[in-house]
Image: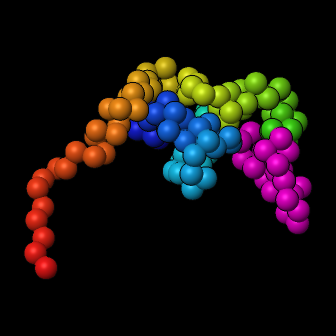
Amino acid sequence: MKDVYSRGHQWRIDAGPVASPTADPFHGQRYTGGTLVLYALWNLVGQDVFRRIEHAFLDRHRTSSASTQDYIAVAAEISGQDLSGFLNKWLYGTKTPRMPGRPDWTVTPPKPAAARRDQVNTPKEKVSATL
């Protein structure tokens, strides 16, 4: 998770915040970034409360669809804390928030778009093909 966390700013620049995509909706940020949000919540509220949040959310929405706001409401109710600010920063923020309980974790500074393009377009080795 530490490695995933370190890439957070770049992913938010490349694909948008976790719950507000600006690029490909299947970008890894949707999946890995979502996992990171849940990990941050787990670090904040602890394992027992996190499990109760997950169980309550799934029990309540077992036969219906649910929104991100539904999840935030259940998390707040079960934890007894207003988690909207915390979760909104993680879900919709343009910068990766600090990871609770992990003061040594850092986010790698994002690369400018031109540097990323050069990195993608630079061949690692010359390849020739003969038909």
Q: Is residue 31 left or right of residue 82?
A: left
Task: Name the residue at 40% across, 32% down.
Answer: 113
Task: Name the residue at 51% across, 50% down.
Answer: 28
Q: Is 33 above or below relative to 24?
A: above
> Per the image, is 68 magenta?
yes
- Residue 74 occupies quadrant: top right
Q: How many marks?
A: 0
Q: Is residue 120 left or right of residue 126?
A: right
How would you classify the magenta stretch by its main secondary structure?
Answer: helix
Question: Is 50 or 96 nearer to us in this picture?
Answer: 96
Q: Is residue 108 visible?
A: no
> Per the image, is 60 magenta?
yes
Question: Is 96 or 119 nearer to us in this picture?
Answer: 119
Q: Is residue 99 left or right of residue 59?
A: left
- Residue 76 occupies quadrant: top right
* Residue found at the far bottom of this picture: 131
* Percent position of residue 29, x then y: 54, 45
Q: Which residues are magenta?
A: 48-71
